Amino acid sequence: MPIPANHSRPVRQSAKENAFNQLQQWIIDGTLLPGEKLNDTELADALGISRTPIRESLQLLEVRGFVKMFPGKATQVTEIEREAIKDLLPPLAALQSLSAELAIDHVTEDQLTQLGSINERFATSIYSGNSYAALKVDEEFHQLIVDITKNTYIQGVVESLQAHVRRHFFHNSIVLTEQSIDEHKAIITAMKHSDKEKATAVMKENWLRTLQEF
Amino acid sequence: MPIPANHSRPVRQSAKENAFNQLQQWIIDGTLLPGEKLNDTELADALGISRTPIRESLQLLEVRGFVKMFPGKATQVTEIEREAIKDLLPPLAALQSLSAELAIDHVTEDQLTQLGSINERFATSIYSGNSYAALKVDEEFHQLIVDITKNTYIQGVVESLQAHVRRHFFHNSIVLTEQSIDEHKAIITAMKHSDKEKATAVMKENWLRTLQEF
DNA sequence: AAACATTTGTCCGTATGTATA
DNA sequence: ATATACATACGGACAAATGTT
């Protein structure tokens, strides 16, 4: 049997990376509860690896704000307050809004088409009531806009903030509504017409509206 | 002899933390050159500690964008392109601008006074030609505004982006001018009058002007 | 192509410091 | 207050992977 030319090289998966992804997922979806104490020996056993990659993962998760380490004392999952979404969305809205503005200078016809088709899948998810699918597609939509800016600083920050949005979703503090579909359309149209003012305004509204509904 | 009541407890500083601060400083001020290969054993010997805290520090520095790790291959200091400042300042301007807006809802008379006195020290540094002192005081000014928002998400992101600004300063891509003094005054005045529009506009201009001069 | 040299990734033991009885 | 139990921070050795001769 011919071995499929796996052009995407197997990207050496380190134990640390696996642990990081797994732990972050567990924190986001609530498997690891807010305030829960994390014992590295325990986690190491659970994941079948040693304490070192666990410790390294926990430190990265601390930077992301998912765990808090008390040196020499303990490590625990950060609390998640419903109210925190009020602090989270404004900076994210500001950066997404900036991304829309910056993306206008780089966006191609092809990418605009792509945004349109993503938004169609978003509409489908919304109408079918699959809210988690909708969230993921919504993320995909905004992620593409951020990527178009080719701004690595924005990319890094947004990725981190988005992870927190996802966590809030699992803790039932976020709801996506039909209105987002039209807002996305408006954003695409504004980008097509290079209307920065409109694009930034709608984008900001798209993110902050969630707060008003909160 | 009576032991002085050191109320500010010595804050157990770990080897990792020391290493992180030292390495970050070395990268910012150019002691560790862009592109330079980092051998953890070497660094461990240099700092008189083991590889573990060094590796942990390097991983945190990677998140911050100061080093890039190639798993199994090597770790090196990230390059610094003069052009990168064009990507760095817009998101920072957006967040500082947002901070000014949010700070208005929480700021006290006392803090406004404090901002004024910081700005006086800033002016002194500018006029005396001590540009690094000016940079640090400027950072202090904006840091206080960010702190007033009490928004931990913004605080974390800004701290990270500011470190990059500092690095660009050492690589001679940033110059602070007298104009900032008046802009700071305008920001304080706008905050005092709860004029969000004015505060955000001036703050944004204050950060983006550096790009125009670039 | 294969063995070597080098560097990173992981494991685990120990010391240090913290909380509890 | 002292001692005990326990979790973390660090160190050093081994294993795995890379690239080099």
Image (tube, coloured by chain):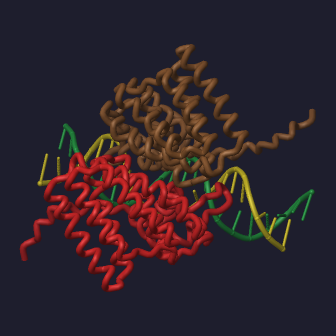
Chain colours: A red, B brown, C yellow, D green
Answer left or right for A118 relative to D12. Answer: left
- The residue at 31%/60% (across/down) is A143
Which residue does the image show at 87% across and 36% down from the upper left?
Answer: B4
Against B171, is A164 above or below?
A: below
Q: Is residue A122 left or right of residue D11?
A: left
Q: How many marks?
A: 0
Q: Residue furthest bottom?
A: A128
Examine the rendering and report whether any part of residue B48 can be seen. no
Residue sitting nearer the eye, B56 or A193 = A193
> Is A61 displayed left or right of C9 in the figure?
right
* Residue at (45, 62) in percent of width and height: A208
Above or below, B38 relative to B182: below
Q: Quadrant of residue B6?
A: top right
* x and y, in percent, of residue A46 in the image: 49, 75
Residue A53: x %, y % from top left: 46, 61
Q: Residue sitting at 41 percent across and 41 percent down?
A: B66
Find residue A79 and report its horizontal and vertical position in percent: 60, 67
Say if residue A96 shows up in the picture: yes
The image position of residue A101, as x and y in percent, is: 31, 49
The residue furthest left is: A2
In this rendering, position of residue A121 left or right of residue A163: left
The correct choice, above or below, for A89 with respect to A33 in the image is: above
Q: Give the quadrant of the N terminus of chain A.
A: bottom left
